[in-house]
Image: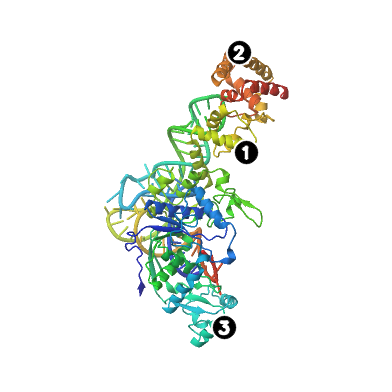
Amino acid sequence: MYLCHNSKVNNMSSKVRVRFAPSPTGPLHIGGVRTALYNYLFAKKHGGDFLLRVEDTDQTRFVAGAEKYIVEALAWCGISPDEGIGGEDRGNGPYRQSERKPMYREYAETLLANDSAYVAFDTADELERVRALAKEAGASNWQYNYITRENMKNSLTLAKDEVKAKIAAGEPYVIRMKLPRDHEVRFEDTIRGWVSVNTNNMDDKVLFKGDGMPTYHLANIVDDHLMEISHVIRGEEWLPSAPLHVLLYEAFGWESPIFAHLPLLLKPDGPGKLSKRDGDRLGFPVFPIDWKNDETQETASGYRETGFYPDAFINMLALLGWNPGTEQEVFSLQELVEAFDLGSVSKSGAKFDFEKGKWFNQVYLRGMSEEKLASALKTELNSRGLHCDEKHLGTVAMMMSERATFPKDLVTEGLFLFERPSTYDEKTLTKKWSADSPKMMEDISSRFLALVTFDAASIESCFKGYLTEKELGFGKVGPSFRLAVTGKGMGPSMFTICEVLGKEEVLARISLAIEKLK
RNA sequence: GGCCCCAUCGUCUAGCGGUCCAGGACGCUGCCCUUUCACGGCAGAAACACGGGUUCGAUUCCCGUUGGGGUCACCA
């Protein structure tokens, strides 16, 4: 017998409503952000709603601040929810499952009443023992299922009176899904096509826990139904439990939403999905924004604090597992909304590549206007206690943007523009600084001194005039000149640098170098 | 291990039976531009996991093998 389940049945006619439903057990990592992003893009593309619901049914794993973090991270990314936590309450709330606690029991009772579920009294210890025993006997994977439930303490094996008595006595119990035997559960996943699993390979999952809270499985289905979720877009790690969810919808007699299971974000190196710990290990952030662990006082770094633009970050994430089929790679959020298509999300996992992420940021940085770059430069300078003349801010920002990936590079790649060199590049010193250098520097110095206008063009013609007159090649004087003024062997145009520094400073640096490099 | 999902350059991917001795991007290499670095421009190396089918014809469809991933809790 088949429990055929075609979730595609004209669901598209009703309004698109999707949700991102994280568990507040810590900071959201980039895989979660991508899931939220795809949900958001899909919703906006179809004029639908994007909701944020918090799945905090496991009180033991609750982490203070995690919910706030999630809201803030999504807001930074520009994908704030229309409804739910961090969005509006449109009458479907509360949007925190812990606050919905009272309503789940009733649904569990419904399942009990229609014979889709049963009560079980086995304690955690007892279950552990059974599993250990099974393992010793060579069965590595003991399941609470249509066979083993016959030997357990539940409402299927115990007399009705006994069950009633136990419950009346306050004995703790759980409610388990009663899976039908040998049924093929089929559903159509938007990304993967038809997925099929036999109930014989599934187990009687706990739906309602001893602590009075539902498990994810029950709460998820009830809430998605009540909140009229049309499409469930989530990570592939949920694929194995999707058949259970399909069965739950059928047990309730509800129409199932359309499922789409996203491919996972994998570690750049070894095997496995990208985890929270990979960040430190590999030297790149795995979180959207900084996360401070209150217990350990440690901070896990985020993309925001690393200097990423939210648009670049989102752009990078969007292309990890999806692409428009054209050769376009740079997308604004709005363009992503227009181009996004769930059906063209790839099936296989994507290894995360930080280098590509940096490239995206570089592209966004270079695309910035002079005003914006100047203001970014100013911010960076201020935070370092450095200063640059207002009138040069734009010039410096544009000049440095060519070699910057992050805003902070605007300063760090050109520190010599804001402070005198304290050391001189060793290699350039030995290779380019000759016995004639001090004399040449003095000559240039005196010529600069005579300059009335000290701008890049004047400096250049003055400098080149000197070269011509003395019949010297640029390579003979240029590098040592750069060394004297900046302490470096390479960098942007010296003439622009000199203009920015100003005559007085340039002359001071030259004499300082002559003095120091004797 | 059981079950499920997946499989094109190092990485992200295009390709939905002939247009593919496989296209783009990141990274890498070389050349040009440049006093230098960077930017930019140009060029290059680099992939259809394997074996069977189906077909006049498979990267594209089917099966198997191998490989990878996920999942097997009173966690989500």
Q: Residue at x 65, y 15 (%)?
A: A446
In the image, residue B51 sits, relative to residue A121, either above or below, namely: above
As shown in the figure, which amino acid type bears the numbered disc 2? Lys
How far, Cα to Cα, is label 1 from label 3?
Answer: 65 Å
Foreground pick, A192 / A303? A303
Q: Secondary structure at mark 2?
A: helix
Residue A129 on image: x %, y %: 59, 77
Mark 2: give few (<14), some (14-19) or many (20+) Cα within 10 Å: few
The residue under label 3 is: A169
Quadrant in which residue A195 is drawn: bottom left
Foreground pick, A327 / A168? A168
Callout in the foreground (2, 1): 1
In which chain is the residue bearing label 2? A
Which one is earlier in the sequence, the residue at label 2 or at label 3?
A: 3
Q: Secondary structure at mark 3?
A: loop
Residue A383, numbered label: 1
Mark 1: give few (<14), some (14-19) or many (20+) Cα within 10 Å: few
Q: Are marks 2 and 3 in contact (CB under 8 Å)?
A: no
In which chain is the residue bearing label 3? A
- Whether residue A90 is visible, yes or no, is yes
Residue A452 on image: x %, y %: 59, 15
Which one is earlier in the sequence, the residue at label 1 or at label 3?
A: 3
Pointer 2 and pointer 1 on the same chain: yes
- Whether residue A178 is visible, yes or no, is no
State which quarter of the image contains the C terminus of chain A: top right
As shown in the figure, which amino acid type bears the numbered disc 1? Ser
In the image, residue A390 sits, relative to residue A177, either above or below, namely: above
Q: Secondary structure at mark 1?
A: helix
The residue under label 2 is: A470
